[in-house]
Image (spheres, coloured by chain):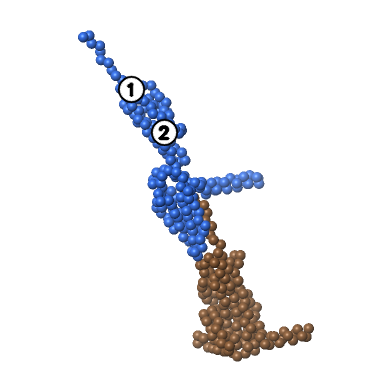
């Protein structure tokens, strides 16, 4: 028992999983794990809490999109957890490149720009442990092949995607919102009627 | 009560079915000038592509789920797969095409000739094949022709499957010769 506790603490110290409780909504919901070609879907994601191990702050939410998504459009950004006193803002970026090493490029997604210079990768994240919620609108490609509609959200720390140098929250674990495909069932014509 | 409800439901279903079903082959009257409208239930906002025989003319609706066709130039007889409609969704997904056979329906009534007659000869019974048609013309009443004093045109009109066909025949009426009074030479 003591060995198990030691291993858990040790792992947490090296690469702590800092993410809070994650949830999502999809509007409209998928049908049998699929969406129709050309269909528009609104995805809203919420993370409640952030561990801040090693004083890491949440830097952003990176989206992983399957090939079946034609477009992704930001709708509502997360609220600033640090409050106005700490400055900064959540912004939608198609790519963000970290300052800390190893240099990493992520995006699209929402990222925290503390210095409000348009580059979330050269500063710290959003301090505190709050409820972060954002929504995006996605459009399914007009395709007849069952392409992937994977949608994952990966929360990342400023020690991973910003300018902070602590690695305690470097374990970036994708959270799967949806892992379906395009509905490619061919349309079926009815009989010809002579009116 | 439950049985009555069941019967009513079946009746309504059969009525709805009969309204939505076109017999295959579809029947079109020979040389009709009326346009025929053909429709498939809409399955989306994609593109519908129709084909018709060379003798027919697609007058309206190409690209939609409803078209109008002029069959007046088509010869009588069955045209297999006369109408075909295919559909491609906005995503480019094709549906299996649907076809309809069309029968260009023609009946040529044949009238049994009558006459020639002498003027004011006794009435005769008219005959034609197929039976069941309607007779008309000067001196015609029902299926009887009563010669007058001049030639007559007799018409036979036959209707089937909504199509009307007619045939004519002439009745020659010869005047009755009139003898002059006897002369004592």
Can residue A103 be seen from the camera position used here?
Answer: yes
Instruction: Find residue B68 and name its label.
Output: none
Counting every numbered tag in the picture gives: 2
**Of callouts 1 and 2, the N-terminal one:** 2
Residue A169, relative to residue B65: is it above or below? below
Q: Do discs 1 and 2 share a chain?
A: yes
Give the class, few, some or many, for how many residues have Cα within 10 Å of label 1's Cα (few <14, many ≥20).
some
Instruction: Find residue B110 and name its label.
Output: 2
| Residue placed most toward the observer, B20 or A52 | B20
Q: Residue at x 40, y 49 (%)?
A: B55
Instruction: Find residue B119 and name its label.
Output: 1
Chain coloured brown in the rendered structure: A
Q: Residue at x 40, y 51 (%)?
A: B54
Residue at the farthest bottom position: A165
Name the colour assigned to chain B in the rendering: blue
Chain letter, disc 1 residue = B
Chain letter, disc 2 residue = B
Q: Residue at x 44, y 58 (%)?
A: B63
| Residue placed most toward the observer, A93 or B54 | B54
Q: Secondary structure at mark 2?
A: strand
Q: Residue at x 57, y 71 (%)?
A: A148
Q: Position of residue A74 (x, y in %)?
A: 52, 76
Q: Secondary structure at mark 1?
A: loop
Decide if residue B97 is on the left or right side of residue B149: right
Residue A165: quadrant of the picture: bottom right
């Amino acid at each position: 028992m003591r060995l198990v506790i030691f291993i858990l603490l040790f792992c947490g110290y090296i690469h702590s999983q800092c993410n809070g409780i994650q949830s999502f909504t999809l509007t409209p919901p998928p049908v049998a794990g699929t969406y129709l070609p050309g269909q528009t879907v609104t995805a809203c994601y919420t993370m409640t809490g952030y561990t801040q191990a090693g004083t890491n702050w949440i830097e952003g939410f990176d989206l992983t999109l399957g090939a079946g998504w034609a477009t992704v459009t930001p709708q509502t950004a997360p609220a600033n957890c640090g409050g106005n006193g700490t400055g900064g803002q959540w912004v939608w970026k198609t790519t963000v490149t970290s300052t800390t090493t190893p240099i990493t490029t992520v995006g699209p997604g929402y990222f925290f720009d503390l210095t409000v210079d348009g580059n979330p990768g050269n500063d710290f994240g959003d301090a505190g442990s709050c409820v972060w919620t954002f929504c995006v609108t996605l459009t399914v490609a007009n395709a007849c092949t069952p392409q992937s509609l994977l949608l994952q959200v990966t929360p990342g720390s400023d020690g991973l995607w910003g300018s902070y140098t602590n690695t305690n929250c470097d374990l970036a674990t994708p959270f799967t919102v949806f892992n379906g495909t395009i509905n490619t069932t061919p349309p079926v014509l009815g009989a010809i009627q002579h009116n | 009560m439950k049985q009555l409800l069941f019967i009513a439901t079946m009746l309504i279903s059969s009525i709805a079915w009969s309204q939505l079903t076109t017999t295959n082959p579809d029947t079109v009257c020979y040389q009709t000038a009326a346009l025929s409208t053909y429709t498939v239930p809409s399955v989306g906002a994609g593109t519908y592509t129709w084909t018709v025989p060379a003798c027919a003319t697609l007058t309206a609706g190409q690209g939609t789920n409803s078209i109008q066709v002029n069959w007046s130039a088509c010869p009588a007889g069955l045209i297999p797969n006369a109408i075909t409609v295919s559909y491609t969704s906005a995503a480019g997904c094709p549906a299996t095409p649907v076809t309809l056979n069309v029968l260009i329906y023609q009946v040529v009534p044949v009238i049994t000739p009558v006459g020639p007659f002498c003027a004011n000869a006794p009435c005769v019974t008219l005959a034609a094949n197929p039976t069941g048609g309607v007779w008309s013309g000067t001196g015609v009443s029902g299926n009887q022709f009563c010669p007058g004093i001049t030639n007559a045109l007799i018409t036979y009109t036959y209707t089937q499957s909504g199509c009307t066909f007619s045939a004519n025949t002439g009745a020659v009426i010869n005047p009755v010769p009139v003898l002059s009074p006897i002369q004592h030479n």
